[in-house]
Image (spheres, rainbow, N blue to C red):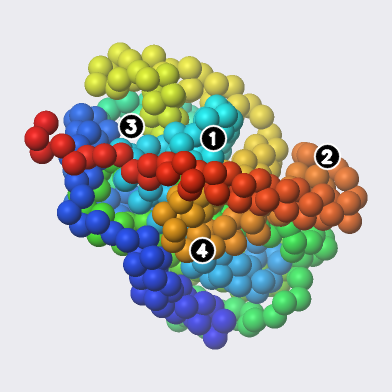
Amino acid sequence: MYTFLGGVALLIIGYFTYGKFIEKMFGVKNERPTPAYVNSDGVDYIPMSTSKNSLIQLLNIAGTGPVFGPIMGALYGPAAFIWIVVGCIFAGAVHDYLTGMISIRNRGAHLPELASKFLGKAMKHIVNGFAVLLLLLVGTVFVTTPAELMSLLTDGKVAAWIFVLFIFAYYIIATVLPVDKIIGRLYPYFGALLLISAIGVGIGLVVTGAPIPELTLENFHPEGAAIFPLLFFTISCGALSGFHATQTPIISRTTKNEREGRKIFYGMMIAEGIIAMIWAAAAMSMFDGYNGLNVILAAGGPGAIVSEASFTLLGAIGGTIGVLGVVVLPITSGDTAFRSARMIIADYLKIAQRKLSKRFWIAGPLFIVSAILTQIDFNILWRYFNWANQSTAVIALFVAAMYLYIARKNFWVALVPGTFMLVMIITYILSQPIGFNLPMNLSWIGGFIGAALIVVLFFRAARKARANNIPLEVDVSDWKVA
């Protein structure tokens, strides 16, 4: 278990070392009032405690990503551990921290507004459409997966569509009510359930002496699927996920002080990485090798792995709690996905959200479209979600790099992982059947050339933005006077 335990230890060390470095480099302003106070509206802008914000952030970003993704990524072998640890510390947590903090400095702005400000006005319309599409896919995926898991808990006696109706009803309530009424009150309990289930499975692996494979670069995928670029789309949440950039503004609008940012944004991404490590380890060690894992995945999907691992390691009662903990993940990301979509559309159309009726006018069509999308094959939705997710991560990292470049700070911490993933997303869409289905060698050439051209354009735009002295933050100096 040296690789598994060492990976978990590195994630924790990364929080106290690289996380501290990123915080110091960004430059926290303790005295600067946050949007929770400056833009207080009693709906989305409400000051909440650090512990509550942290748990909400963890549940917002987690979804089924750090469970289902690592389970499917386990087919590649211990290479999955490398991506989770390295990706989480140097890409995912940096992505979450910088997008969260830049949002705080810009009145809790969502990614489309930040992209417009730092990457050009045309990007606002592109990223708006991209973000809403991603959130719709997330919300839809996170309706079907928990419904299927809950149906499994009842041995199929209750059909999945019945749970779908209940989950949709909850999503509607959580999307339109003030953030402290449902999300702020329920999430601490949901968070406890999530942590108990993940820690329980992790302890179970250690106590039972599960044969978790040690570090190797060999690809164990039974079907020979390539690690590059596929692993980086199979495991997104838990390593790097653009979905998080759509979620952090929810908490950037409820954070009391900038010094809380490292714990809330960087720290909760590290926690998600640990959850991903646990489920990847469980999948690698409990099903008679990678062929056995592949057979169960083909028969019952990741949900079957979750159920089998939970009941095997934790018993009947503990297994039920474990499965419920995993059910909580997608539900508590689905509700905030729809909430984020409502907020993004409201910001784009400049529709104030104080009145309940205006929230319903925006949220209603979103749920109608999502209900239609539930009829599409889950595997197709998941593939498009993965590509849209990592494309959003690249946009967010380039926004962060632009902000740091203009501020004359170390922009490489965002640009390097952003460029790496840029190569991956171009290569992926060129090579895969859901994209252009080109030969792999041509796709790699296209990936590197496309990424190089975009990086050149980035530096040209960055020099121009620095010369024009684009304001990095919204002026709040007269807030107390007002």
Q: What is the CA distance from the residue labelled 2 to the residue labelled 3?
A: 38 Å
Q: Looking at numbered disc 4 in the image, what kind of residue is underneath it?
A: Val
Q: Is residue 99 left or right of residue 309?
A: left
Query: Is there CB contact under 8 Å for labels 4 and 2?
Result: no
Mark 4, Cα crowd under 10 Å, few <14 / some 14-19 / many 20+, is: some
Q: What is the CA distance from the residue labelled 4 to the residue labelled 1?
A: 21 Å
Q: What is the CA distance from the residue labelled 4 to the residue labelled 3?
A: 35 Å
Identify the residue under disc 2: 436
The numbered mark, 4 or 2, whose residue comes first in the sequence reads 4
Place of residue 57 in the rendered image (x, y in percent of width and height, measured from the top left): 35, 50
Q: Nearer the viewer, mark 4 or mark 3?
A: 4
Q: Nearer the viewer, mark 4 or mark 1?
A: 1
Whether residue 248 is visible: no
Mark 2, Cα crowd under 10 Å, few <14 / some 14-19 / many 20+, is: few
Identify the residue under disc 4: 413
Identify the residue under disc 1: 120
The residue furthest left is 481
The numbered mark, 4 or 3, whose residue comes first in the sequence reads 3
Using the rendered view, name the quadrant where residue 72 is placed: bottom right
Q: Looking at numbered disc 2 in the image, what kind of residue is underneath it?
A: Phe
Q: Is residue 188 left or right of residue 374?
A: left
The numbered mark, 2 or 3, whose residue comes first in the sequence reads 3
Does dot 3 land on a helix, a strand or a loop? helix
The numbered mark, 1 or 3, whose residue comes first in the sequence reads 1
The numbered mark, 2 or 1, whose residue comes first in the sequence reads 1
Place of residue 173 in the rendered image (x, y in percent of width and height, measured from the top left): 32, 27
Does dot 2 land on a helix, a strand or a loop? loop
Query: Is there CB contact under 8 Å for labels 4 and 3?
Result: no
Q: Nearer the viewer, mark 2 or mark 3?
A: 2
Place of residue 262 in the rendered image (x, y in percent of width and height, measured from the top left): 33, 61
In terms of depth relative to the viewer, which is nearer, 270 or 290? 270
Q: Is residue 424 left or right of residue 239?
A: right
